Amino acid sequence: MNPETIKAAEKSLFDLTDKVAIITGASKGIGEDMARVFARFGAKVIVSSRKQDACDALAADIKAEGGEATGIAAHVGDMDQLKNLVDQTIAVYGGVDILVNNAASNPVFGPSLDADGAAFDKIMQANVKAPFELSKLCYPSMKARGGGSVIMISSIAGHTPDPGLGLYSVSKASLNMLTKVLAKEWGTDGIRVNAICPGLIKTKFSQALWQDDKTLAHFTKRLPIARMGTTDEISPMALFLASSASSYTTGSFFYADGGTVI
């Protein structure tokens, strides 16, 4: 096989041409980077977050780069908005092939004993129930189109509790089990369900952990790769899971954490 043929075959593995991808929490951070990468590889991307102007801004930017994207705002805590997100996606692009459950919430930092029921409900709603409900809403379209890929953005906190992030850790452990359950139940319909478990990634969401040098050093100095990660070290993994390159992969967890859980 000549080099050009090999190159073309490698590219086709990650080709998302005409695939429709919904990404929640997509206006910034890991979600934004995934939206840009998916579009570069041919996907029609639905940029979703709480604010329509932020969704529209990123969608316009992706179009300016030669990609295809549409902004559809949705608060993951509102079932009506989630249904509208899927309905509008199908109205615009005809269906759904890829869902990235990226949006998450963590309104508290500190001992779990200090967290109240309202905080628990908010975390579980955004981090577990919303991915569950949105995945179910996308299921009929994915099944009708011959299959699809659901990607959960979990966390190493679902593997081992993070200090000060007890309830968040509980929610991500629950999301990990949801990943396994849906993978087992939906595999016969051609729908793969996998999770990415980032460690400390430089985003606004994790700012409390890296904005102070002392705190950052506490989290990174013992890692085999002794630094925090960046969003562009997560999106290629998502591309793999969204594409045919991972066609025999489901119910799996992919850690991008600098070796934290070793």
Image (spheres, helix red, strand yellow):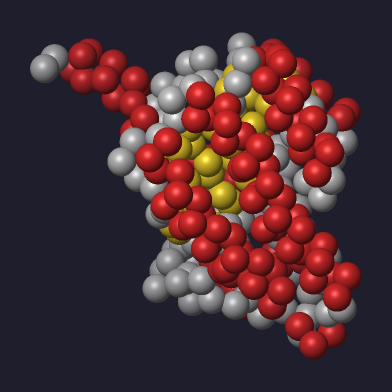
Q: Position of residue 166 (x, y in %)?
A: 69, 77
x 73%, y 63%: residue:
124
Determine if residue 205 is in view: no
Residue 40 left/right relative to 106: left
Residue 253 left/right relative to 52: left
The residue sitting at the left extreme is: 1
x 66%, y 66%: residue:
171
Determine if residue 84 is in view: yes
Residue 199 left/right relative to 259: right
Q: Position of residue 119 (x, y in %)?
A: 84, 70
Q: Is residue 55 above or below residue 152?
A: above
Q: Is residue 236 above or below residue 38?
A: below
Q: Position of residue 113 (x, y in %)?
A: 80, 88
Please state the total of marks drawn on the protein image.
0
x 49%, y 22%: residue:
145
Q: Which quadrant of the rendered structure holds the N terminus? A: top left
Q: Choose between 52 and 201: the one closer to the eye.
A: 52
Q: Quadrant of residue 22?
A: top right
Q: Position of residue 163 (x, y in %)?
A: 66, 80
Q: Choose between 212 and 151: the one closer to the eye.
A: 151
x 84%, y 85%: residue:
114
Q: Which quadrant of the rendered structure holds the C terminus? A: bottom left
Q: Quadrant of residue 105?
A: bottom right
Q: Choose between 191 and 4: the one closer to the eye.
A: 191
Q: Is residue 143 above or below residue 209?
A: above
Q: Quadrant of residue 189?
A: top left
